[in-house]
Amino acid sequence: MSRMVLAYSGGLDTSVLLKRLIAEGHEVVAMTANLGESDAVAGAGAEAELERVREKALALGAYDAVVIDARTRFVTQYVQPALAANALYEGVYPLSAALSRPLIAALLVETAHAYGAPVVAHGCTGKGNDQVRIELGVRGLDPAIAVRAPLREAPLSRPDAIAYAHAHGIPIAHTTAKPYSIDANLWGRSIEAGVLEDPWAGVPEDAYAWTAAPAARPAQADEIVLAFEAGAFRVAHADQHDVPAQTIAWLNARAGAHGVGRIDLVEDRVIGVKSREVYEAPAATVLIAAHKALERLTLTRDELRFKALADQRYAELAYDGLWLSPLRTALDAFNATCASRMTGEVRVRLHQGSAVVVGVRSPFALYDEALATYGAGDAFDHAAAGGFITCYGLPLDRVARVNAAPALV
């Protein structure tokens, strides 16, 4: 009999997996990470829900079951660096699931050390992204720990998993009529499978949980002010939201009520196939929009142009499971130099599914109204523009003259 640590969510796949591993004769420690799924929309009873997950694992026969509160660690070590990079995979997805996987890998390794387990296991399938992210994370932290992926070894369809659960008395929330696979944390909620696998089909309203349907959204717009200090965010003039995790939960609820943060994306998975994914990320949508607006006010043109390229690469590294790569660490260092000027306030209007920046100010603003205005008080030296254009256009002038010259005989 061997001991192993299983990344356990309490959902269909990991509950079936837990039972199967126990049946193989293993002592399985069920490790559940609290990343804010239950309180992501400022809900109550998060601790009670996680305790039910722990008790479920024990009832299914786990050797032990632990719940690790990693919310603060998730926000400070993963979400905030990603926000500094405006990380959006393929320009759309704010990487909610992708950012949690290297942390889950770290927690698996730490729990394995604590229990003397030489093996860790996960419930990822053979064609998903998370197998790559978790296994590379474990390998990058402790290559001596073996990783098992039982659902890759013996694939199990969702209907078969549901049938297995019913046959073995495993309580589940899935049905064949609504077989969504859900993953959520403070930074976002992912929904896949079932009818969503057809990219021509619209997303059924019952797939959403954090964002209000169009008919249920307020008729009036709502404005909020976000304050940044050296890149750290909070809700302006609201001391109760100084804790970043609380701010994110509050924004999920406030923006979600307006339907902000719905994402429907056919994305390119790490292993090369395309997948239709649906996300809800109200807080991430608002914070990234606000952060970008503040950058445009405070950073130079060269910094912004380079940062756009670096931000795209950052998102790809996170998505592709390369969080521990030296390049990601180097990009963090670059973003930290920019963050020193990321202080200011951003006003965001929430209305009917959109989050629009309507105002931004900063003591580090590079915008100068006296130089930008076309009205009274214009301090720009218009006469200097002629010389600038002459010098700036010299290469084009030379090319045009060469192209117009007669060919040499």
Image (cartoon, rainbow, N blue to C red):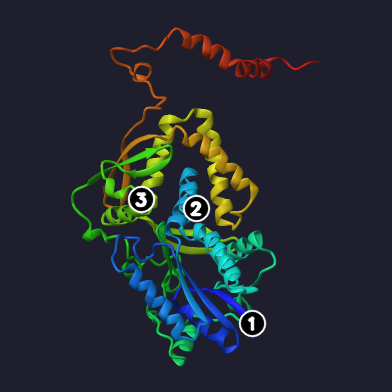
Examine the image and state in which quarter residue 291 appears.
Answer: top left
Examine the image and state in which quarter residue 261 appears.
Answer: bottom left
**Mark 3 Cα within 10 Å, few/some/many (few <14, many 20+)?**
some
Mark 3–mark 2 Cα distance, whole angstroms, equals 15 Å
In front of the other: 158 or 347 = 347
Give the amino acid at mark 3.
Answer: Val
In this view, the mark in front (2 or 1): 1
Identify the residue shown where x is 67% and y is 19%: 403
Q: Secondary structure at mark 1?
A: loop
Residue 176 on image: x %, y %? 41, 82
Give the amino acid at mark 2.
Answer: Tyr
As drawn, 350 above or below 398: below
Numbered label tally: 3
Which residue carries the number 3 mark?
Answer: 243
Check whether the beta carbons of the residues at disc 2 and disc 1 lie within 8 A of each other.
Answer: no
Residue 162 on image: x %, y %? 45, 84
Identify the residue shown where x is 36% and y is 30%: 362
Which residue carries the number 2 mark?
Answer: 78
Which residue carries the number 1 mark?
Answer: 2
**Mark 2 Cα within 10 Å, few/some/many (few <14, many 20+)?**
some
Examine the image and state in which quarter residue 124 appears.
Answer: bottom right
Q: Which mark is residue 387?
A: none
Q: Secondary structure at mark 3?
A: loop
As drawn, 123 above or below 324: below
In front of the other: 116 or 19 = 116
